[in-house]
Image (spheres, rainbow, N blue to C red):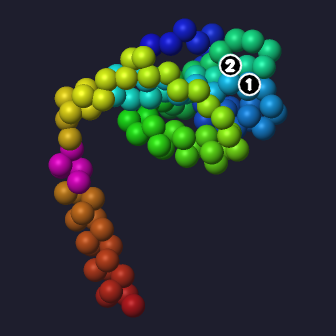
Amino acid sequence: MSDADTVMTTAELRVLHAAGAISVYRLVAQGASWVLSVVFATGGTALLVRTRDKAPRMFPDPGKLLRQLRELGVVNAQCDMRHWTPEQRELQGRRPDRSLALKRLHARAAEAEREAG
């Protein structure tokens, strides 16, 4: 997946960014998703991972990753699209069951709000 020296969570990314420890931010394509790799000012690299299981944090939508970087104050990032295969997204199953469950949840919440107010 990546040749990163180490891994970091989103909380660690915030601290390292605030300290000025990161010199390069890279959006790296992995199939239909994206990961964030950084290069430290002192050398070495790190990959953004999920806090829960330390698996690479995958972003199906690169816009979400860019927004997260912008919220941190990052104004420049590199983009590596060598391994980008957006057609793989079509192979990943949709979740109509989750969509239906969320629609029902929103309908119940709206109904409860009307009854309360």
- Residue 48 against residue 44 in the figure, above or below: below
Image point 17% across, 49% down: which residue? 96
Observer-nearest of 54 and 64:
64
Q: Residue furthest bottom?
A: 117
User: Which region of the structure is painted magenta?
Assistant: 95-99
Q: Callout 1 environment at 10 Å: few (<14), some (14 to 19), or many (20+)?
A: some
Q: Is the magenta stretch mostly helix, strand or loop?
A: helix
For label 2, the SS is strand
Observer-nearest of 96 and 31:
31
Image quarter hosting the C terminus: bottom left
- Residue 64 against residue 79 in the figure, above or below: below
Answer with mark 2 or mark 1, whichever residue precedes in sequence.
Answer: 1
Q: How far apart are marks 2 and 1 (CA)?
A: 6 Å
Image position, residue 30 (x, y; %): 40, 21
How many callouts does the rendering have? Answer: 2
**Seen in the image, is 105 located left or right of residue 26?**
left
**Seen in the image, is 63 located left or right of residue 102?**
right
Image position, residue 64 (x, y; %): 48, 44
Inspect this view and state whether residue 53 appears. Answer: no
The amino acid type found where label 1 is placed reads: Ser
The amino acid type found where label 2 is placed reads: Val
Image point 61% across, 35% down: which residue? 10
Determine contact: label 2, label 1, CB under 8 Å. Answer: yes
Image point 24% across, 63% down: which residue? 103
Task: Read off the residue under disc 1.
Answer: 23
Q: Is residue 22 on the magenta stretch? A: no
Task: Read off the residue under disc 2.
Answer: 39
Inspect this view and state whether residue 6 appears. Answer: yes
For label 1, the SS is strand
